[in-house]
Image (spheres, helix red, strand yellow):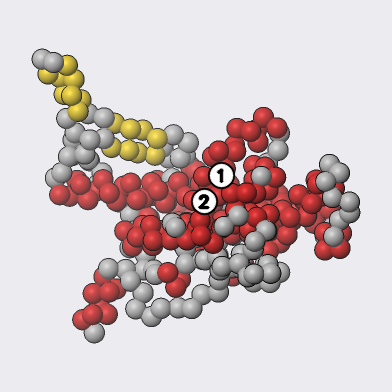
Amino acid sequence: MNMRSELRKRCWNTEPKSKFMIPSSSNPLINASRAIALSAYPNSKDHVRGGKAEKYSTALLANIIRISRNLGEVDSLPQWAKDMRVESMERNLSTGYRNLMRALTIRDVINSALTMKAQHNQHRLGEKMTFTIQYSPDTQSVNIKIPLKPTVSGYILSGRIPDTKLASLRAAILYHQPALQKFQGPAVNADGRDPEADYQNTYNRYVRPALFAQHIVQVVWDQITDAEQEATERGMPVDELLMRKPDWATNIHSTTGQGLGSAIYDMRQLGISSCWCEMVRFADPLPDS
């Protein structure tokens, strides 16, 4: 019992779970569509056959195949792509893209919470940091403070004890409401928004499920960061550009697996129990996949 109690304090799962693994493929297009879809829909309830993640993934594939046909790169559409009506494809693409943008915002909120936590630990221990970081409430900018000390030879890095007093995932979610509000529905109360209800809804529906897929989100985020300017210049959604250049997803099971340990460590830093058994993971591709 003491061992179980200690494990819980350290945010380990005391009852490991067997979680469904997402199939990967030797085809980078399929891997790219699934990685993007899982980032947008990290909740396991959306990973079932016919679920939201599959619909977004299928729409991404259907769209890129239709583009390839229009460019003369393929002769005809496969039957499954013909069966997906253009209206349905566009609707799933639009909804999926919106959720993908929300996933990137949630990634920033989680990173902000981790930064708060690290700086709060330094504050509690009375230790100096070379610089401190604070995300803006809308996550669109980062304020970096680098304390300098004048000397006869010029300025030198002096460091300072961070003044971060609030450090938790809850504090970060409440602080970043300006970034999250654009993804929330209308207020349910006549008097306006209920901050506590908004927090509970955001945490339970979006942030907590996203924590179990951050190692996948990070891989997709890296690609979006590299492709964002080109997508803007070409006037296309960034998820479409990632599908047009899918080589980044060739070994998605291996690439995302490399970040699994860091994702679990970050969750435990925020007080969320986890282990590899609960994370959203890609399985190795089958020989004939």
* Residue 201 left/right relative to 160: right
Where residue 105 sits in the image (x, y, percent)? Answer: 51, 46
Q: Position of residue 257 (x, y in %)?
A: 47, 61
Labelled disc at residue 223: 1
Mark 2, residues whose alpha carbon is within 10 Å: few (<14), some, or many (≥20)? many
Tell me the element at label 1.
helix
Give the amino acid type for the residue marked by disc 2 in the picture.
Val
78 horizontally vs 135: left or right: right
What amino acid type should be assigned to the residue bearing mark 1? Gln
User: Dot 1, how many residues are within 10 Å of its Cα: few (below 14), some (14-19), or many (20+)?
Assistant: some
Which residue is pictured at 59% across the width and 49% down the height?
248
Q: Secondary structure at mark 2?
A: helix
Q: Residue sitting at 56 percent across and 58 percent down?
A: 252
Looking at the picture, how far across and down is residue 130, in whole percent? 22, 35
Q: Residue 289: horizontal and vertical position, in percent? A: 68, 67
Q: Is residue 214 left or right of residue 172?
A: right
Are dots 2 and 1 in contact, CB under 8 Å? yes
Between 200 and 269, the residue placed more toward the observer is 269
Whether residue 284 is situated above or below residue 188 in the rendered picture = below
User: Which image quadrant: the N terminus?
Assistant: bottom left
Residue visible at 40% across and 35% down in the picture: 142
Q: In front: 145, or 266?
A: 266
